[in-house]
Image: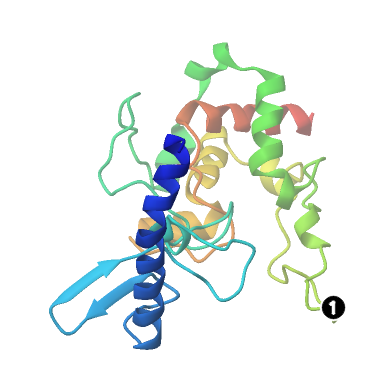
Amino acid sequence: MPINALNIRRARPVVIIAAFLLILLVSSGCYNTKTGEVKVGGAITFDLPVFPKTGSHAVQIFSEMHYSPAYRSQEVPRILPPEGSVPITGAEVKVLDIDKLKTLDGQVHSGSYDAVESARVYAVNCQVCHGQTLLGDGPITTLNSARGDGSKVYDGAIPVNLVSERVTSLSDGEIFGYITWGGRPGLAAAAREKESTAIMPQFGYLLTEEQRWHLVQYIRDQSR
């Protein structure tokens, strides 16, 4: 008899016993079909692969990954770096005072400015709200919700027109501060050590200091 066939025949009793034990655990209420957790009596607890009642997968081996929390892009709650963590490029000095922000100068980053790369950073992070031409008419302002009742996905304040006098009259440091802390509401919340409720993310956690200064220069270029 071939070795493979012999191994299969020897494995059959093990498979049958395992299937019988699983059926026994399920029928006795010891096996949780959602998490794979098995409790025998009050002293024994272990995990088995998950056998869901519905779904496209008959067996999900990595049950802990399937049931762990996951967040899509821009979905709350936003996962931020641990408090006090420092990037490999060094810690950035946090400026929350508006008068101090007015004095900031991003010229140190102007030499590395790349208009094409800055346009890409804008498209990825800002365009959905502020629009392709920075007028504050991004897709989020017109996108219909999935409810089918004519309502919009977003019904909050209209995103700021970045080429309007409201923005062009600001100093570079102010624009940098609003990008960093999530607009005026985000800056005000950070100054009070409160969590921001504004839809605009605090990009100080998402973009490097250089990228944010380059966005300031990109906005200036588009305003001319």
Q: Residue furthest top?
A: 111
Percent from the top left, x then y, of residue 77? 47, 62
Q: Residue at x 31, y 26 (%)?
A: 90
Q: How many marks?
A: 1
The vertical placement of 6 against 119, above or below, is below
At label 1, which amino acid type do we have?
Gly
Which residue occupies the foreground of this view, 2 or 216? 2
Left or right: 104 as drawn, with respect to 43: right
Mark 1: which secondary structure? loop
Left or right: 181 as drawn, with respect to 39: right
Q: Residues within 10 Å of mark 1 (few under 14, many from 20)?
A: few
Residue at the spot of label 1: 148
Which residue occupies the foreground of this view, 78 or 113? 78
Q: Quadrant of the C terminus?
A: top right
Left or right: 93 as drawn, with respect to 74: left
Percent from the top left, x then y, of residue 104? 45, 31
Q: Is residue 36 in sight in this rendering?
A: yes
Q: Residue at x 34, y 74 (%)?
A: 21
Residue 89, picture quadrant: top left
Q: Residue at x 15, y 84 (%)?
A: 42
Q: Residue at x 78, y 78 (%)?
A: 147
